[in-house]
Each structure stands twice: as C-alpha cells, then as structure tokens.
Amino acid sequence: MKNVLSILLFISLFYSCDNKDQQRYVSKSSGNINNLVVVAENQLWEDSVGEAIRDVLAAPVEGLSKEEPQFSMNQMPPSVFSGFAKKNRIVLKIEKGKDASTKIATDAFARPQTMVVVSGQTNEDIIEQITSNAPKIIDAFNKEEVKEKQRRISKSLFNDEPIRKQLGLSMRFPTAYRIAKQEGDFFWLRRDIETGTVDIMLYEVPMSFIKDNNSAVVDVVRVRDSVGKIHIEGPIEGSYMGTEDAFSPFISKTIIDNKPAFVTKGLWDVKNAFMSGPFINYAIEDKVNNRYIIAEGYVFAPSVTKRNYVFELESIIKSLAIK
C-alpha cells in the first residue's frame, strides 16, 4: 500500500511541475496607451539607430492639425530594463551584434504584452530591419493598444439597443457618451470633455454613393458634407460642419467586422465660426444590405493635444459589428 501511495505521489508531483512549466506565470502589464518603451544602448539611441526609430514610430499621426507622434517613447539601456520596466505593454528591444532579424514576442515578461526585438550586426543592419519592417512593427503595437483601449472601454458600456434596432449593428462605447440626436437612421453620440467634445456619427447610405475607385475620397467628402449640412449645425445661422478645403484628407482601405472599408482622415471645420478639428471616417461595405455603414468620429478640443481622443474613436469604431 505504501508503495502504491508513493507512486501516486510521484506522478502527482511530476504532472504538477510539468503544468507549472507550461503555464508560466507572468504579471499584469501596465502603461499609458500608446506609450512605448525602447530598450537600446544610449549610444545607439543617440545615433542613427535612434533617428530611424523616431522617424518610424514617432512619425506624426495622419489627419491632425498639429503634429503629434503616433507613439510616445521612453528609452532605457538594457542594464536597467528590469522590474517594473519589463511590465510595459509595448516594448521595442534593439540588440546589436546578432544576426539581422525582426521578431515579435507575445507576453514575454507581462500579459498582455507585445515586444518587438530588432537585431543586427551593425547599425546599418538594424536600421534596414526597422525601415523595411515598419508597417509590421507599427501594426503589432497598434493592435495591442486598440485591444487594451477596448478592454478599458468595456468596463462601463452604453446600452446600444436603439442603434441595434435602427441600423442593425452593435458598437461598444462607454457610458460617458450620450445619444445627442437621433433622426431616422442617423445617430449623433457625444462625450463632453473639459475643453470641448468627442463625437461620433452613425448612419447608412446606398452603396452607389461611394465608388470603389480613385474618386472614393471625393465621394466620402461629399457624403459627410451633405450629412453635416443636415444634422450638424454651426453656431451661426446657416453654418454647418464640413470638410476643411485647405487640407486634403488621407484615404486608405482597411477591414472592419471582416468587411472591406474605406478609412478617411482629415480636418473638419465650420465656416465663419473658427471651429475645426480632426475627423476619422469609416465607410464599411455591407453588400448583404446594399449599403455603406458610415461611422465617423471627430474631436472639438481647442488648444489641447488630440491624438488620444482620435485613438479612442478609432478603437470604438473598430468594435462595430453588423448583425
């Protein structure tokens, strides 16, 4: 009997140790949204490698009236990358003297965490890795931060039942927003901030309104200006929110809810009212219902940085799902 118990105890300990190895404990990650830790020797950071990193990851966000970097960066040498510093949610690590490569590690020191490790024998090798893999690096960090922002938003969600009933879609946004206006299939959501408002418009248009060709940006602007004229009045009689003429919007393609979409970034303004700000407009193709769902976020916040507000709007719209 003793022998049987000893065997059972040995088997239990063996599998217990094996499970611990498989389920390695890592602490919870931390950090402000879009705050990137760069682990690199000081000399590399101050030289051409640092310049390449800043050119790629601190490049201005498209569509803002004033330049703001895509990521705020804090650099530290490898010797001090320990303890709390390892818990940052997004990390770029530079390793000189190794074969040239760019690798993406998940939950290496904390969870959730995305760490990009760029290596090379020389500065030139490292710079080539950074520049040639820039889209992949940015996308990896951006997806992690959108996921984190959506997690924070999910802690206190607005009941979107009116939107579900009218437009046949769901979207996850916090209770800090309110439905300021609903007319038919048009919804205007607003969140008050200290210096202004953060707003979202939701509506639908027939697919024929936006052509999938070189004129798509013209079609998007025409649609948003016509909707602004009807629904978003300015403070002066006859004024309304339109698209700023002096600033050419950026347009690209993306995927929302597994559906093709145009994403347009630019500046809105109200003529003769000295009001303007950035907008991000998603035209999501819904072939089943022969329509585009238009989800647009815009910010009115004079004299303050707007990157984080636009990122919040982007994260909310990316949660949209057509039912």
Image: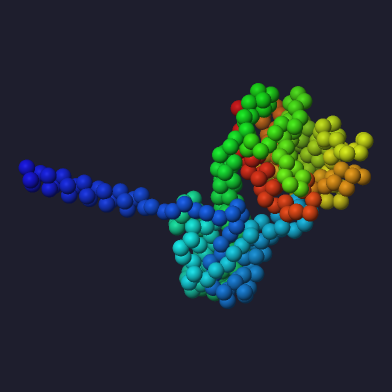
Q: Quadrant of the N terminus?
A: top left
What residue is drawn where x is 60% and y is 68%? 127
Q: Nearer the viewer, residue 241 or 52?
A: 241
What residue is drawn where x is 59% and y is 41%? 153
Q: Which of the 4 image quarters holds residue 319?
A: top right
The outermost residue toward the left is 1
Q: Which of the 4 image quarters holds residue 294?
A: top right
Q: Position of residue 179 (x, y in %)?
A: 71, 31
Position of 214 relative to 227 (above/below)? below
Q: Is residue 279 left or right of residue 75?
A: right
Position of 73 relative to 309 (above/below)? below
Q: Nearer the viewer, residue 289 or 111?
A: 111
Q: Nearer the viewer, residue 164 or 304?
A: 304
Q: Is residue 228 left or right of residue 192?
A: right
The outermost residue toward the bottom is 43
Q: Is residue 306 left or right of residue 24?
A: right
Q: Position of residue 210 (x, y in %)?
A: 77, 35
What residue is drawn where x is 80% and y is 37%? 224
- Let me know if residue 196 appears in the view: yes
Q: Position of residue 112 (x, y in %)?
A: 49, 50
What residue is drawn where x is 68% and y is 37%? 177
Q: Quadrant of the C terminus?
A: top right
Q: Across the whole image, how many numbered discs are drawn on residues? A: 0
Q: Position of residue 157 (x, y in %)?
A: 60, 35
Q: Nearer the viewer, residue 242 or 173?
A: 173
Display colour scheme: rainbow
- Let me know if residue 264 appears in the view: no
